[in-house]
Structure formats: C-alpha cells, structure tokens
Image: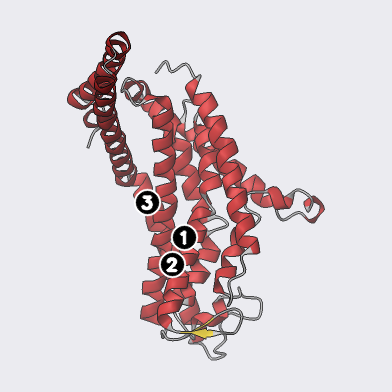
Amino acid sequence: MSRAETTGGPEVGDAGTGSVDSENAGGAGGAGGAGGADSESGAVGRAPRRLWTLGLLRNEIGTTFRRWRTLALLAVLAAVPVLIGVAVRIETSGEDGGPGGPGGAAFVSQITNNGLFLVFTALAVTLPVFLPLAVGVVAGDAIAGEAHAGTLRYLLVAPAGRTRLLLVKYATTVTFCLVATLVVAVSALVTGALLFPLGEVTLLSGTAVPFGEGLLRALAVAVVVALSLVGVAAIGLFVSTLTNSGIAAMATTVGLLIMVQILDTIPQLHAIQPYLFSHHWLSFADVLRDPVYWDQLRQNFGLQALYAAVFGSAAWARFTTRDVTV
C-alpha cells in the first residue's frame, strides 16, 4: 500500500468534509437553537477521522514491516537464539560435558535440562545490545526518513494533523518493539525444542512449575522486555524530529544507546545509574521467581513511562512547531 492510498482523495475528502460540516452545523445550531443537528453532524465528522487514523496506523505498520531493512533486523534477531542454541549444544556434546563454564550466564547452565531456558538466555543476550539497536534504527527513521524521502510534507496535508501523525509513528515503533521481542522468543523456543528436552521448569527461586506455566512466564518475560524498550522508542522519535536525515537520526540514537550502556557500567557513576533507561532492563528475571518480585519491575516500568512522557513531549513540541519544507 502506498502513501497515496493512505492520504488519498476520497478518504481525505470525507474526513475534511466531515470537519467542515461539523463546524457549519455548530454555527447554525448557535444561531437557531438546533443543538441536535450540531451533535449529529459532529459525530458524523469524528467517525471518518477515526477511520482515517486507523487506516494510517495500519498502513504505517505495513510499510515498516515490508522494508528490507526491517526484515533484515528481524532476521538477525531471529538468528541470535539459533547461534546460542547450537553453541551450547556443541559445548555440551564435548568430552567435559560442561554447559559453558562457571562464568556463563545464569540461564545458560539450565538450557541443557530444559530448552525453554533458551528463551530467557536469548532475551538476556539481545536486550542490552541487539534489541535496542534495532528499535533505535526504526525509531530514528520514523520522521527523519519521511523528511529525507520527501513524503513528510505530503502526509501533513492530510487532516489527521501533526499530533496524530506523531502518535501513529510512536505506536508503530512500539509495535516493532513487541514484534522484535516475540521474534527472538519464538526463535529461541523452536530452537530449544529441537536441540534440548522440554519439561518442568525450575524457576530461579527453586520452585518447579509445569511446562505450560513456564511457557506463560516466558511470554510474560517477552512482554516485559518489549515494555522495557518504550523509552528507547521515545528517544529515537525525538531525535528523528530534529533532522531531515534518516541516517543521522539513526546514528545519533544508536550512539546515545551505546553511551548510556557505558555509563551504566562505571562504578563511579552509581548515583545517576538508577535513572538511566537501561538500568533495570534485566529485571525481567524477577518474573521467573515464585512469588514474582515486583519492586524492580515497577521501577523499570515507571522509568520507561517517564522517558516516554518526557521525550514524547519533547518530540511533540519540536514536531508541531517545525517548519516542514520538504
């Protein structure tokens, strides 16, 4: 579906007509006391705009996931669990039979006993680097890519307005966060089922739960990881409103991600580290305890919501006052 189909004549005309009719009806109602006509016309005017917004969101999501760049990012994310699973399988088939040595990640030693732990291992490996980088690329290109391609001004001709367009862009980026996380989780689950046995899941607290409950917890972990990326999505969207170059926006967003990751590892900066958006990313491990530890999860969600609110507001302030000349 092309951009022209999203903002094309009939839909734009219907929405615009509805808006004008609503205003005219309001004026007539004030003059002649016909309040019912104003309400009915306003409702008719709002319906096409809602449909236009849904159509724009559907088109934006479809366009994003049809791009070769997006498909390549998802392919790389899907390959990471496969590489981890094959490496662990080769390591455990050796003479020593070790799962990766005492210095391995907490989840790696459990993969050979239950392939479901490959899901948790893959998410733990991809969350600090691969997933945020992929989200940064998509978010950084959201507005700047349209400006560089010359389609941003055309989109703003439509009656949705800049605020609604910005919300659609952010919703699309958040959708990518969820899809990318699920791609990693599903790839890890399939790989783990093919290479290792499945069965009861022993949680980090030592409690054994049925495989079905373990699968639900794996889904919950994937959702937590996706929600942990909404702050990155807001930062990338804000950066994208500052430039007309998609490459510059993506590079800046990725650079910020790397810088924050470095800051979070310097002991001397412990005072500011709790406020970095990446500080509580690995709190998803608390979902694998019985009972679930909610303190770190709440802090993570609250911090992501704060970043989304601050940088989302900054993106709105910049985009609504921006002089779009291309």
Residue at x 52%, y 51% (from the top left corner): 229
Say whether residue 251 is visible: yes
Residue at x 78%, y 53% (from the top left corner): 270
Q: Is residue 147 left or right of residue 102?
A: left
Residue 148 position in % (x across, y down)? 41, 26
Residue 314 position in % (x across, y down)? 57, 30
Residue 95 position in % (x across, y down)? 53, 91
State the image quarter where residue 100 is shown: bottom right
Q: Is residue 25 left or right of residue 216?
A: left
Q: Is residue 84 above or below residue 60?
A: below
Residue ID for mark 3:
72
Residue ID for mark 2:
219
Residue at x 42%, y 86% (from the top left corner): 199
Neighbours of disc 2 within 10 Å: few (<14), some (14-19), many (20+)? some
Q: Which of marks 3 and 1 is in front?
A: 1
Q: In this view, does 194 lie above or below 243?
A: below
Name the colouring of the figure.
secondary structure
Residue at x 43%, y 67% (from the top left corner): 219
> Hey, what amino acid is under mark 1?
Val
Q: Which residue lies furthest to the bottom in this view?
A: 95
Residue 22 position in % (x across, y down)? 28, 19
Say whether residue 3 is visible: no
For mark 3, give the secondary structure. Answer: helix
Q: Which quadrant does the C terminus fall into?
A: top left
Residue ID for mark 1:
223
Cα–Cα span, label 2 and label 1: 6 Å
Q: Are marks 2 and 1 in contact (CB under 8 Å)?
A: yes
Which sits in the foreground, 250 or 225? 225
Cα–Cα span, label 3 and label 1: 22 Å
Identify the mark at residue 316; answer none if there is no mark.
Answer: none
